[in-house]
Amino acid sequence: MIYSTISVYLCIPSMKKRLYNIHRKDILQKKVQDEEFERFTISFYRYVYLNDLEQLRDELYEEWDALGILGRIYIAEEGINAQISVPEHNHASFRKVIDNRIEFKDVPFKYAVQDNLDSFYKLKIKIRKKIVADGLDDDSFDVTNVGNHLSAKEFHELVGREDVTIVDMRNHYESEVGHFEGAITPDSDTFREELPIVEEKLEGKKDEKILLYCTGGIRCEKASAWLKHKGFNDVNQLHGGIIEYAQQIKKQGLESKFKGKNFVFDRRLGERITEEVISHCHQCGAPCDNHTNCANDECHLLFIQCDSCREKWDGCCKQECYDIVQLPIEDQRKHRKKHKNEDSLSIYKSRLRPKLKEILNKEDGPKDEKNP
């Protein structure tokens, strides 16, 4: 069975063809929800030299679209980074398509901990300068001189030892809802910001055993090479990241030393690894580890919101956003257009530990005609 989204060729003289999806989000959502087959959520990456990126991008789009692949993929001269949703009945065909390209042959697939969820609704393949924005000058150090790759069991046995330092190489909003016991969890919005923070946190530990981990392993590849370049002598990384760890620990019947949720960069925003809830609602402080993006299209702040606050605030993070969302759709569009070049919401734009309780003055809910 061949499944294909409707895509178009954009043909303009003197320009290369580009492929993209032409449907609205609601149509794409319904299409996936109406599917009568299951899907696998898969991620993979590889650092490998790629050329002719525009041609490669179009070829991948055509090949993968024909198999019903959905997801977000970045390609750059340094390699590929993909998070995708694959129809179960086309899984073997997709594996063959990947292996037919020598640069991607035998690349390890990492399967989501929680299966059969509508993680993606469309296929997007983008060309980037790097597959992970790290802010590093790759010519200044040997990016191939990476840390020791540890299996899930090897990593598991080292967690908790006093002579080991564990570092979470993810962003704050990821580690906030789940992390390994005793790990350093830097307050950073991006991987680019995190690297110098980690180096500072590890001051005086160049001869100690360092354990790095991230979601699937890609950030640790670059971070471990950078730390070795900086003089750290015993750098190790969790092979396959949290995703592989969760799968292997379960198979081996071991109790997970990763507690809480694993944040993922798709519609799910998280996979539950253990039942512990280690974070709190940013609005009321109740135990909660459910992320949401503010419903106001002018904001989209990523924050933790419990079900009660979600209902009270209509999925919004603050009064200004709530007021905008209550407007008719056409009025919301006019508001966005009017304030397009203004920073009226800039105080709330930072993703770094949003202190919504302070912003809201600990109010019980939004103020409007229905809630005076």
Image (tube, rainbow, N blue to C red):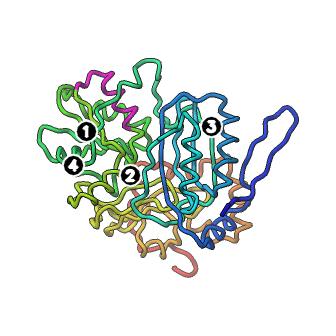
Amino acid at dot 2: Glu
Above or below, comparing residue 292 to residue 183 in the picture: below
Badge 3 is on which residue? Answer: 127
Q: What is the number of the mark on residue 156?
A: 4
Secondary structure of residue under mark 1: strand
Discs 2, 4 touching: Cβ within 8 Å: no
Bin the neighbour count of mark 3 within 10 Å (Cα to Cα): few under 14, some 14-19, many 20 and up. some
Q: Report the front residue among 315 and 248.
A: 248
Badge 2 is on which residue? Answer: 174
Q: Residue at x 49, y 66 (%)?
A: 116
Badge 1 is on which residue? Answer: 211
Is 93 situated left or right of 178 in this image? right
Amino acid at dot 1: Leu
- Outermost residue on the right side: it is 13
Q: Residue 194 falls in which quadrant of the image?
A: top left
Separation of residues labelled 2 and 3 (CA atoms): 25 Å
Nearer the observer: mark 3 or 4; the answer is: 4
| Main secondary structure type of the part rendered in magenta | helix
Secondary structure of residue under mark 2: helix
Q: Residue at x 21, y 44 (%)?
A: 154
In percent of width and height, residue 229 lies at: 33, 21
Highlighted magenta segment, given as a residue range: 220-233
Separation of residues labelled 1 and 4 (CA atoms): 11 Å
